[in-house]
Amino acid sequence: DQQVKQNSPSLSVQEGRISILNCDYTNSMFDYFLWYKKYPAEGPTFLISISSIKDKNEDGRFTVFLNKSAKHLSLHIVPSQPGDSAVYFCAASGMGSGTYKYIFGTGTRLKVLA
Amino acid sequence: DVKVTQSSRYLVKRTGEKVFLECVQDMDHENMFWYRQDPGLGLRLIYFSYDVKMKEKGDIPEGYSVSREKKERFSLILESASTNQTSMYLCASSDGLAARYEQYFGPGTRLTVT
């Protein structure tokens, strides 16, 4: 069973607009969440994270929102740039997965159109 | 900069062959991980190691084994390759096992088993 779900396999956004990528999880024991970005032919790279004690974390153009009651997190990219085109994975960790493991979602392919 | 390198970018093997995938990190990280990435399934943890000669099974260890004889090197072994092991294999390392420790990924090895 997929404990971390990214229900949109792909998303297209115009340059300069907001990109919103969504992630849902089922295990309420998860307490730390991360977003990774992956370009073709490269390994994933860390983008931003959030602890369950917060509901928002911001880093430049990237903001992650966490709604614990809905077991939902989202990544907002404002403004979107063509270089943001990549596959984005959310990941969750915590007692539900063993504190040393990430459980990754299936990924969302973002395409930012110039 | 953390560097994680994988011995091959592309590999083609025959069913039944024994396959070795090598991973080397240069940041003296304690922990190393092997994942596979498949469309629609995201990244799934195969094995990880938290010290030399120490290993633990991840979520999908069947058909795989690992070896960590030196801190910087973590090998994934397919004892008898099968077609369902055709996949992208990603190695990662981290400085700690808590979720807040970012995992650094290598570029991946695309393995095709025919």
Image: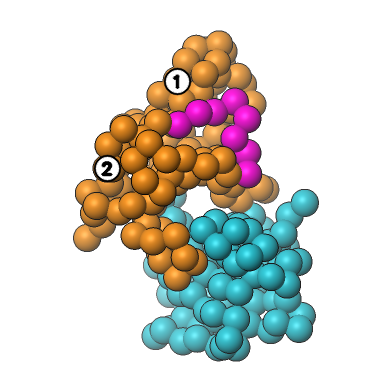
Label 1: chain letter: B
A57 in relation to B36, above or below: below
Q: Give the image location of residue A96, x and y in percent.
A: 67, 63
The crowding category of the residue bearing disc 2, from other C-alpha atoms within 10 Å (few below 14, some 14 to 19, many at least 20), is many
A34 in relation to A102, above or below: below
For the point 56% across and 71% down, which residue is it? Answer: A33
Q: Give the image location of residue B22, x and y in percent.
A: 35, 32
Q: Is residue A40 magenta?
A: no
**Residue identifier under label 1:** B19
For the point 33% across and 52% down, which residue is it? Answer: B30
Q: Please tell me which residue lies in front, B24 or B65.
A: B65
CA–CA distance in space, label 1 to label 2: 20 Å
**Which badge, 1 or 2, comes first in the chain's sequence?**
1
Chain coloured orange here: B
Is there any visible trace of residue B105 in the rendered image?
A: yes
Mark 2 is on which residue type? Glu
Question: Which element carries disc 1, helix, strand or loop?
Answer: strand
Label 2: chain letter: B
The crowding category of the residue bearing disc 1, from other C-alpha atoms within 10 Å (few below 14, some 14 to 19, many at least 20), is some
Question: What is the span of residues highlighted in magenta in the rendered image?
Answer: B59-66
Q: Main secondary structure of the magenta part?
A: loop
For the point 73% across and 67% down, which residue is it? Answer: A27
Chain coloured cyan here: A
Is there any visible trace of residue B6 in the rendered image?
A: no
Does B108 sit left or right of A92 as displayed? left
Q: How is the image coloured?
A: by chain
Residue A6 is labelled as none
Does A85 sit left or right of B60 as displayed? left
Q: Give the image location of residue B23, x and y in percent.
A: 34, 38
Q: Nearer the viewer, mark 1 or mark 2?
A: 2
Residue B72 is labelled as 2
